[in-house]
Image (tube, rainbow, N blue to C red):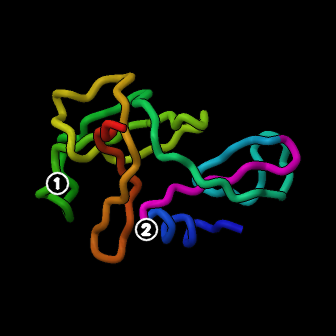
Amino acid sequence: MVTLKTFFAEAREGRLTGLRCQHCGELTIPPKEFCTACHEHSWDVVQLSGDGTIASFTVVRVAHKTNTHESPYAVAVVQLKEGVSVLGRMVDLPLESLAVGSEVSFRPLLSGEQTLIAFGPRAPR
């Protein structure tokens, strides 16, 4: 079973993990205790590609009192190629280049012991 603790431990290592309901096939990220589609509690662990497109985004221009050096920054909803969406920070992209439909890839954003979900430009393959 993937818990939030193991989800972020995997993310720290560069792996994005989801759960697929064994009963109805619903895919979820981050992990949840019960399936929101059928309310079952039976999951399979799924490794996700981390590749997706920006579905929406916002630019945060007001600094948080503990992170004044980090604004402005962007947060986006990214629809992964597997069909599930996840919220993450945008990194390594100029704010003016952000656009709905832009292709991005997952990368962990490390801050001390904390791991954040982040996305940057998709590398050519």
Q: Mark 1 belongs to which amino acid?
A: Glu
Q: Residue 37: percent from the left, percent from the top?
A: 79, 40
Taking depth in this image into account, of 123 and 97 the one nearest to the observer is 123
For the N terminus, the image quarter is bottom right
Q: Residue 41: percent from the left, percent from the top?
A: 83, 58
Residue at the (49%, 60%) spot, across then down = 15
Q: Which residue is mark 1?
A: 70
Quadrant assignment, res 51:
top left
Residue at the (31%, 33%) spot, across then down = 58
68 left or right of 76? left
Residue 13 is tagged as 2
Residue 22 is tagged as none
Residue at the (75%, 44%) spot, across then down = 36
Query: Which tag, 1 or 2, sits closer to the chain's start?
Result: 2
Asked if 7 appears above or below 100 in the picture, the reply is below
Distance, label 1 to label 2, CA atoms, is 23 Å
72 left or right of 58? left
Q: Mark 2 belongs to which amino acid?
A: Glu
Magenta stretch: give its range. Answer: 12-24
Q: Is residue 14 magenta?
A: yes
Asked if 53 appears above or below 37 in the picture, the reply is above
Q: Secondary structure at mark 1?
A: helix
